[in-house]
Image (cartoon, rainbow, N blue to C red):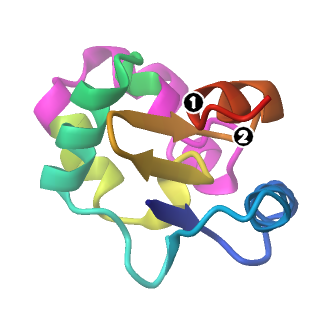
Amino acid sequence: MLFLEYPKCSTCQKAKKWLDDHGIAYEDRHIKEQNPSEEELKAWHEESGFPLKKFFNTSGMLYKEMQLKDKLPQMSEEEQYALLATDGMLVKRPVLVGDGFVLTGFKESTWAEALGIK
């Protein structure tokens, strides 16, 4: 599994602790230093079944500074992938990529269900 995080993010810290507490192995990746590529984002979006907007960090400063709330509806998916790939801080985090699933953000019940944890 691949775990993309921003180490200073409290939600990422909670998610990482939760994974560790449940003995789940993962590869850790700093989302700012190694931001996802357009190809990765497209593959993850398709795998997740989520609307593409769920991959945007809508509460982030960069999202707000760029006024993306108003701009995204006018952009094609290709343009949105390209934009997300420019800066890891635009991507909703943490991201967990596993075999057959992709999760954005951390919601314990959703992660437990995806990972088969009761």
Q: What percent of the width, then of the height, locates residue 63?
A: 56, 45
Local SS, label 2:
loop
Relative placement, left or right, of 43 versus 108 is: left
- At label 1, the amino acid type is Ala
Magenta segment boundaries in residue numbering = 54-78
Q: Residue at x 57, y 30 (%)?
A: 114
Q: Main secondary structure of the magenta part?
A: helix
Tag 1 near tag 2, CB within 8 Å: no
Give the Cα distance between marks 1 and 2: 25 Å
Residue 50 is covered by the magenta coloring: no
Residue 114, numbered label: 1
Residue 14 at x, y percent in the picture: 86, 58
Q: Residues within 10 Å of mark 2 (few under 14, many from 20)?
A: few
Answer left or right for 84 relative to 40. right
Q: Is residue 61 above or below residue 42?
A: below
Q: Amino acid at mark 2?
A: Ser
